[in-house]
Image: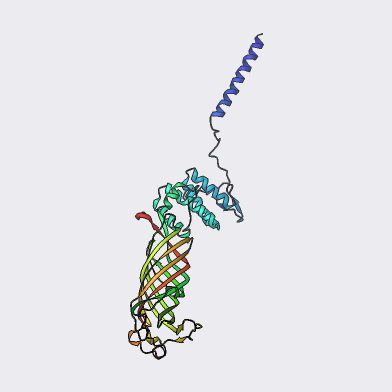
Amino acid sequence: MKNHSKILILITLATLTVVAANAQTDSLPPIPLYDNVVSDDAPDADESSPRQTINPFERRKDSKNNAAPQRHMPNSVGEQLRILSNLYSAGKYNDALALSDSILQNHKLTKEENIYRQVHTIAAFKDLEYNEEADSVTKLFHQKYPFYKPASYDPVSFKENLGNYYTMPRFSVWIGAGPAGGMPQIDTVHVITDTLNREPSYDPAEVSGFVFQLGFEYHICKWLSIAVAPTYMRYQYGREIERGMMTTFRYEETDNILTLPMYLAASLYTKREIWVPSIYFGAKAKYITKAKYAAYTQTIGQAQYTASTRSLDLDDKNQSNFALMGGMKLNYNYRRATFFADAGLSYDLKPFNKPGRGLSNSDLLYDKMFIPDSFHMMDLTFVVGVKINFFYKTVARFGYGY
């Protein structure tokens, strides 16, 4: 019986010893034995060399120049960008910045990939309160991607910093065309045989022509710009007056004109900046390159007769002239292109015909019994076209910046 009691006591003590040992192993970290032991073949430590920190996403070369990863490295850009997003979401902003730089240096990124990288780079700088660095990268981002609209999943700090700036083009070039016309504003009517009606009629319905324009614009700021637009214009105007109960005298003239408009434009931007109206004021130089006319008398009841056209002597005109001008535009912005409709009006400073040359055209004077009126020309134009914007600049809102 005593032997059985001794055996039972020994078994109990052994069991308690095993349980105690297991309890210590679960609660304490393993303690390495002989931690300072160094192999006899190992080289001595170089105390003068600094300690190197290995980037987990970099490869190192072995003695045979074969790429040997220190640890698992993501092979695709997409995988590294996902890690970049995870590092930022975890608040590891310095690691996110280091990985962002590594991705840029070691990969050729598409537009979408680079945008994703820069979005998280800007957000990491901002969350670290590196405001100057965040602003610098944001300006470059705006210049490279001036039409980027933040997505709902973009970091809040990125969207807030992006909203502190806007972009504007420095230069624009446009091309446009449309209908044009000249509306004479009468100063003096010279009458020879017109006894029934001393006031001729310049019917607006008879004004017809076209305009072709090439424009260059420099943007002083987002809302203000200056422009110059070399323009070729051709139009025809008609004049008629009754010369009797049954007859009407008709004069038609066609003019080809080169103009050089220069003006200041002010734009009214809406919140979305897609539809933008603008107004402009300025002046333009005019030069008549060619002028032709046809003059004839039409009698009621007879077949309509149209005289053949003849060239006008440009010495009879104020060939060089100047005009005040103004108008309004409606612009539709789509990325770097702007589609526009332009309605313009101008008024000549000098008379269209030279007053002292009214009697110089013998055909009109003796055959048609007509002396050209003295008037100032008002030009009407309606142009539609497309404008391309270049060299975008990033501008801080409300003086923001570091």
Closest to the observer, 208 or 246: 246
Give the position of the C terminus as an image quadrant.
bottom left
231 versus 223 height, above or below: below
- Residue at 50% across, 52% down: 100
User: Residue 372: percent from the left, percent from the top?
Assistant: 37, 84
322 versus 2 height, above or below: below
Closest to the observer, 263 or 109: 263
User: Residue 377: percent from the left, percent from the top?
Assistant: 37, 77
Give the position of the N terminus as an image quadrant.
top right
Q: Is residue 342 visible?
A: yes
User: Residue 385: percent from the left, percent from the top?
Assistant: 48, 68
Closest to the observer, 353 or 58: 353
Closest to the observer, 69 or 170: 170
Q: Is residue 43 visible?
A: no
**278 left or right of 24 in image:** left
User: Residue 332: percent from the left, percent from the top?
Assistant: 46, 61
